[in-house]
Image (cartoon, helix red, strand yellow):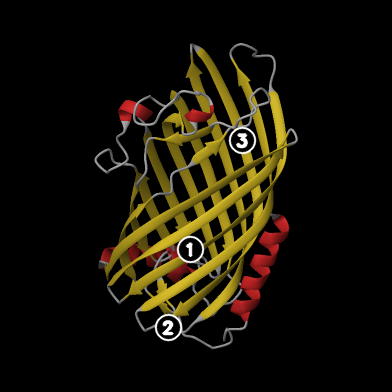
Amino acid sequence: MKLNLTFLLLTFCIFISAQNDSINSQVISYDDKIMLRLNLDTNIDEFVVSSRELGIKPKLALNSQINTTFGLDYKFISASISFAPDFLPGNNDNNFKGKSSFTSYNFRFFPKNIIQTLSYKNSKGYYISNTRDFVSDWQKDRDQYLQFPNLRIQSFGGSTSYIINKEFSLKGIYYQKEWQPKSSGSFVPSLNYKYLIFSDNQNSVKSREHQLDLNFDIAYHYNYVITKNINIAPFAYAGLGKKWSSYKNDVSLSEREKDNYFTQNFGAGLHLGYNSEKFFFGSKFNYSGNHYTDNDSNVVQNDFFVLFFIGYRLNAPSKVKRVYEKIQEKIPAL
């Protein structure tokens, strides 16, 4: 797996580097506009649980298949809130999967060639998506999934990414804050960090687990501009990291179970977009994988999600401009 992934990534980078990356393209910025955005995506977190007692790895999932995100961007900052409305198909199968709730807040900052992301997620009410592995006569659409209605997962995370090629606009691909009129690509190294808190109350026994994930990856993005309004942008990445975990419950308060693992991260994706001065829309297809070894067994988590976005840019009111100018006087780097 590791050799194949490395070979594919290198092949991808060599192919893209053969393209004309040296063209001096003038990136068009929309920083002076207020941008409103709506996303619909299937990026629902699923957790693979490691256990010394179980040979099978339970997969914890939310009773939600589609997230809705509202975003607001202006100048150096971007903010968004995500949730999973019950009225959307796939988000309300409470009879079989139990009731779930999900909320996410994201903030992004764009100083120079750096993209800084901070996020907070809060979710509650999980079920085991691979219930069939634990209940031999279990049948879908007839039996309930094994459920953890009181399981709550909080996630505090972030990433710091640096765009090496100044003529390449990652902000244009991911956040539509810019438009790159000529094709170009860039390597983008990123440092990613996440702190998770798992808390549950099962059969009057309270338990709590803490996880810290740190990893560093290198991605290559290429923005292929088909016409003056349409672009296609593939990417691939690979990286290494470290995971630390600590677990305890009410039964054995004096004993704390601790583990740590080396992790391997990899992924790829494709962006399709349409852009005009005021209106934009498109879709993204992302695959990500995470692998580590736990007690001589391999744990592999693969995720694939689809995202659709639509947005509109409008002129910023004069009051908003004055507030930004005052902030910029105190922090010139912005």
The quadrant in which the N terminus is found is bottom right
Q: Around disc 1, counting alpha carbons within 10 Å, would you say few (fewer than 14), some (14 to 19), or many (20 or more)?
A: few
Return the residue nearer the eye: 22 or 292: 292
The residue tagged 2 is: 181
Label 2 element class: loop
158 lies above or below 252:
below
281 lies above or below 167:
above
- Asked if residue 155 lies left or right of residue 103, the reply is right
Q: CA distance from mark 3 to mark 1?
A: 37 Å
Q: Is any part of residue 190 visible from this angle?
A: yes
Q: CA distance from mark 2 to mark 3?
A: 42 Å
Task: Give the residue type that dot 3 points to.
Answer: Gln
Residue 102 screen position, x and y as percent: 38, 38
Residue at the image point whose x is 54% and y is 32% from the top: 197
Q: Give the residue at the far right of this rendering.
A: 296
Task: Give the residue type that dot 2 points to.
Answer: Pro
The residue tagged 1 is: 330
Q: Which label number is shown at residue 298?
A: none
Q: Around disc 2, counting alpha carbons within 10 Å, would you say few (fewer than 14), some (14 to 19), or many (20 or more)?
A: many
Q: Which label number is shown at residue 211?
A: 3
Q: Give the residue at the far front of this rendering.
A: 137
Residue 143 screen position, x and y as percent: 37, 24
Q: Earlier in the sequence, mark 3 or mark 1?
A: 3
157 lies above or below 169:
above
Label 3 element class: strand
